[in-house]
Image: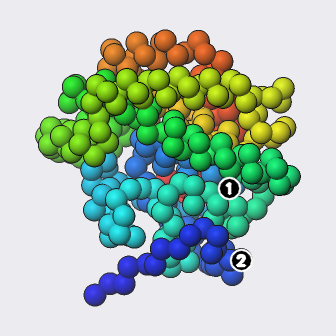
Amino acid sequence: MTTKPAVFPADEVSPSRAGSAAPPVLWQMRMSHYNEKARWALDFKGVPHVRRSVLPGAHIARAKRLYGGRTLPAMELGGRVIPDSTRIVAALEELAPQPALYPADPAARERALALEDHFDEELGPHVRRALFHAQLPDAPGTAAALTVGWPAPVRRGYGLAFPLLRVAMRRTMRIDATGAQLGRAKTAAALDQIEAELGPSGYLVGDAFSVADLTAAALLSPLVRPPGFGYPLPARWSDEVEAWRDELAGRPAFSWAGEMYRRHRGASAAINE
């Protein structure tokens, strides 16, 4: 019988664990914006790591095996598992303090962490819900978008199974007309907040890139489709999604997210891709 690695909060990561010879292993979904947040933190800090990609839907079984949960990303480090992108970023601050994502000034750090939590709750789920409500009616197109870059046999099999997966997605993510309307409103509100928070430096907190900028830009990535995303994104979503994207593309916060990618996304630190 195999032993499942224990889950621990990020503040339990110690320098001795950080010095482990084995590189971190990131279990991820390539297209997910929360997974992109964790990837970006690893790459920004230049932490060599192994990536294990799982298709949407299959990720639930993998998460249960890893730590008893239902979501990815999750990072294996020193024989233990860290679930959740926010905990992963916190663990990486301990593992590789420089370049820092947490501001050194206590007040600025508190503000950056508050914005991270805010965008995690008030942007991430809502942009996803609104996008998929518009995208899911096109089952072949959605299956193709979620498997861009995977081998052809995988893409064919996923396409055949997708009508069943679509039912589960609508249920678990509460994808309906009411949720989509709220999602669009919440996304617009997040863009408003980004524009209100930006300082003369072009960053959300102080004069340097922080976890607040990374989180907001990563969670907007499905709409922005930045070239630095790291995996092939669909050249186009459904007509309804593209119309929504066009409505937002003129917003300063939309352009800002692309600029954060241009300035700070950098090269992948994965050692297996």
Question: Which picture quadrant has residue 119?
Answer: top right
Q: In this image, 160 relative to 92: left or right?
A: left
Relative to residue 23, is residue 271 depicted above or below?
A: above
Q: Is residue 210 left or right of residue 248?
A: right
Q: Which residue corresponds to mark 2?
A: 15
Tell me which amino acid carries mark 2. Pro
Query: Which three-letter amino acid code belongs to the residue tagged 1?
Result: Gly
Counting other residues with Cα less than 10 Å from the Cα at mark 1, is it few (<14), some (14-19), or many (20 or more)? some
Say which residue appears at 83% left-offset and 54% top-offset.
106
- Along the line of sight, which residue is nearer the eye, 202 or 178? 178
* Residue 60: percent from left, percent from top: 30, 58
Q: Secondary structure at mark 1?
A: loop
Q: Quadrant of the N terminus?
A: bottom left
Mark 2–mark 1 distance (CA, rounded to whole Å): 17 Å
Q: Is residue 88 left or right of residue 97?
A: left
Q: Earlier in the sequence, mark 2 or mark 1?
A: 2
Q: Quadrant of residue 164?
A: top left
Residue that mark 1 sits on: 46
Residue 235 lies, in percent from the top left, at 41, 23
